[in-house]
Amino acid sequence: MNLDGLRPWGGLVGSPPDVVVAGIAYDGSAVYRRGAAKAPQRIRELSAAMPPVTEEGHLLTGLRVQDLGDLDPGADIETGWMGPMQRLGQVPPEAFLTVLGGDHCTAISTLSAQVRRHPGLSVLWVDAHPDLCDFSRGGSWTCGCALRRALEASGIEPSRVVIAGGRDYDPEELEFIAANGILLVSSAEIARDLGGAAGKIGARLAGQKVHVSFDIDVLDPAFAPGTEIPSGAGLTTRQALELLRAATERSRLVGFDVVEVSPPFDTGDITTFAALKLIFEVWGMVKIAREAELSQLRGKR
Ligand SMILES: [Mn+2]
């Protein structure tokens, strides 16, 4: 890939930051196959190929992006999640946080930091799997337990979580979802009626500060083959973008993490580029929302 003369993040840079990026290059919780630790570096490299413009022609120019580099949880997320959490927790609340995983257990650090920055936070967990097992594949800190541990570590109420795109479950996870008032909207439901599914999620998240934790395996393996455990019958990248936009238009987006991109299993970097498309479009949503807020403030004056 010839990236000569191009700068990371589409050339978007500056301070004080509107967007803070950090990587967590950890895949020690991957029980199927490792590789996600290589994602932050690959995503950054290829971010230079992205134009600072959204798909609908909104300029991202002027968005000040600050990249903190990678934060290290050490060899084991169980003992190391607080390190990255503390660093991320220092990011000023005005900045939109973007975290590059890593496997999904990196969200334990991310969500714990986010709820400190934004008390009362709601979470949109976009994933083929709920990751709500108490114990899975020989451990309590494996990828199937990511959301369960993240809720415990962060103190976020389970009822403030919406899971979108689910299609592979353990019975234990469905019990936890039912018992704790979590809204689950499956991939099938999204495919049947995207507008209806987004409306249902949007009603739950309306007026809330929302962090989106996006497991790339929610996308169909045709769109994102480079992931730890591909799951068939997933969303298209198109559906995921439409869903994100429609489901959060009445909320305030405060952060986004994209996890489980696994460069060693990718094909021609299409998974990394799918992740980058999502990141840049989410930044566009945030920028458009802030501009609307500002012009409203000016109108009131
Ligand atoms: Mn996951």
Image (cartoon, rainbow, N blue to C red):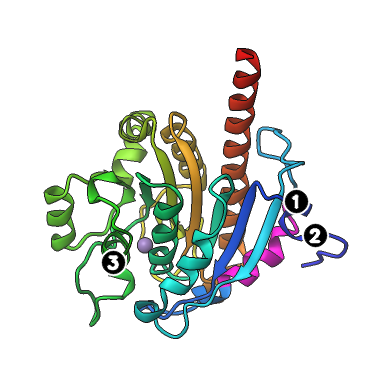
The residue under label 3 is: 149
Residue at 83% over, 59% down: 6
Is 158 above or below relative to 201? below
State the CA–CA distance, disc 2 to disc 1: 8 Å
Tell me the tag on residue 12. Answer: 1
The residue under label 2 is which amino acid type? Arg
- Answer yes or no: do the residues labelled 3 and 2 have beta carbons within 8 Å? no
Can you say which quadrant of the picture contains the C terminus?
top right
SS at circle 1: loop
Residue furthest bottom in the image:
75
The residue under label 2 is: 7
- The quadrant of the rendered image in which ligand 1 is seen is bottom left
Looking at the magenta stretch, what is its main secondary structure? helix
Give whichever of discs 3 and 2 has the lower sequence position. 2
Residue at 53% over, 66% down: 87
SS at circle 2: loop
Q: Is residue 47 magenta?
A: yes
Answer yes or no: is residue 223 visible.
yes
Residue at 46% over, 40% down: 244
Q: How many marks?
A: 3
Give, as a single range, the part of the protein colored magenta.
Answer: 39-50
Give whichever of discs 2 and 1 has the lower sequence position. 2
